[in-house]
Image (cartoon, helix red, strand yellow):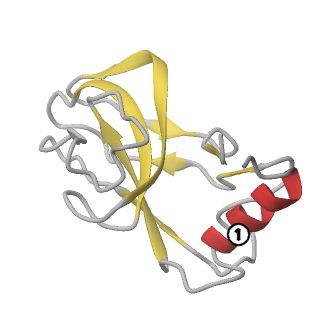
Amino acid sequence: MPATTLGMNYLLDTFFGTKETVPTTYYIGLSTDVLTPADDDGSDCNEVSGGSYARVAITNNDGDATEWTVAASGELANVNDVEFPASTASWGEIKSVFISDGVAGAGDIYFYVNISPTLTVGDVTLVNFVAGTLIVSMS
């Protein structure tokens, strides 16, 4: 059964810290694979490694909207820019961005987006998602 907008907003607000116990930190990661809904444990995610790659930590501030917007119309977004460290070697062709509850190589993947066109990251490349561009929804 599909959720109403109210239902989606409630679930998003719950997941990001206002209703239930949730992770205190989320991590934004990059994958060279196209992810699917079945990739929730990260085992099929070919995450970038090496070349100074590290997931970007975002503190879950328990619903005060300093890191994520308040859900509206079934979605929310990052309030601040998400900046990865500059690559020091090729990270390859980035096909997906995801949100996890663990550092690189660990944790579950809760949300993802497959990007098009893909992003090829070479040596000395900056990857940045400006505020409002990481849109999390239930669809």
Q: Position of 128 compared to 136: left or right?
A: left
- Residue type at mark 1 is Thr
Rendered view: 40 above or below 114 = below
Which residue appears at 39% of the width and 33% of the height?
96
Rendered view: 31 above or below 79 = above
Which residue appears at 27% of the width and 51% of the height?
42
Quadrant housing residue 108: bottom left
Where residue 94 appears, as percent x and y from the top left, is: 32, 27
Where residue 120 appears, as percent x and y from the top left, is: 31, 19
Which residue appears at 75% of the width and 69% of the height?
65
Where residue 84 appears, as percent x and y from the top left, is: 38, 47
Rendered view: 3 above or below 108 = above
Judged from the image, the secondary structure of the residue bearing numbered disc 1 is loop
Label 1: how many residues lie within 10 Å, few (<14), some (14-19) or many (20+)?
A: some
Extreme residue toward the front, this view: 1
Quadrant housing residue 70: bottom right
Residue situated in front as seen by the camera: 67 or 125: 67
Q: Position of 2 compared to 37: left or right?
A: right
Residue annotated with mark 1? 66
Quadrant housing residue 51: top left
